[in-house]
Amino acid sequence: MKTWTAASHVFPYSFNEVVAAFWDRYPNSFAKHVLSEDVLECQVSGDEIRTKKLIVKKGASFLKSAPSWMSRLINIQVIPTIEESIFNRVSGTLTTYTRNVSCRELFHMEEKCFYKSINERHPMDRMARTELTRHLYVNVTYGRINSLVERVLVMTFNKSVKRTVQGLTERLEERYGSPIINVPFKSRLAGLCKLYPRSMLTVSPTFTDSLVRKIRLIKA
């Protein structure tokens, strides 16, 4: 078995916005290989919503970039997958598990994604952000070259992650518009200091105070 962890990604949207877009992310321009999406189960228990979906993908795009000698994999036409998600309203988290339910005699891949709200460190910048972390588990039954095939699958899957994020971002922008990227207050002041000679800021405290007041007015 081989495991892989992707670099975390931050969406400049609130957690609730990301969750709403996640549940309705298909179709999008970056997921044309997805043939169908059906909800199998949906349960509400206390502060949790659990869903199970059957998502059928055409030819698993990430497998298409595998080497030709892996013919048994690249010739796969359709891959049904099960996606289970757990939304917790109190903790403000969404955890998803996706696994293939066909071709398991060749390989087993399970992806775990974890979405959570994160707070900006500076109190004057309250823009909502949501962090996504992703883990992949791969187990291959391919004879003596299992470890090699696992590495190939991880590399090809890695290339597909970018399109997955782009697809969710597209749906977020369609629903909520392009985000307004707020520059932290401290960074703004540092940027303005670069525009003016240091002597002006050192000699004239009044000038510095006026800059601070103007920035606060802009923020308000």
Image (tube, grey):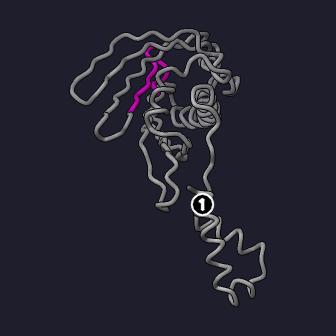
The stretch in magenta equals 95-109
Residue 87 horizontal/vertical position (percent): 34, 30
**The one of 54 and 62 positioned closer to us in this rendering:** 54
Residue 139 visible: yes
Magenta span: helix, strand or loop, mainly? strand
Check disc 1 and report its element: helix, strand or loop: helix
**The one of 198 and 6 positioned closer to us in this rendering:** 198
| Residue depicted at x 78% and y 81% | 197
Residue 53 horizontal/vertical position (percent): 42, 15
**The one of 199 and 97 positioned closer to us in this rendering:** 199
**The one of 88 and 112 positioned closer to us in this rendering:** 88
Q: Residue 115 sits in which quadrant?
A: top left
Residue 48 horizontal/vertical position (percent): 28, 28
Q: Dividing the image into 4 quarters, which one contains the N terminus?
A: top left
In this picture, is 206 found above or below 130? below
In this picture, is 10 found above or below 141? below
Q: Residue 210 sits in which quadrant?
A: bottom right
Residue linked to disc 1: 217
User: Crowding at label 1, few (<14), some or many (≥20) Cα neighbours within 10 Å?
Assistant: few
Indicate left or right for 44 with 199 as reference: left
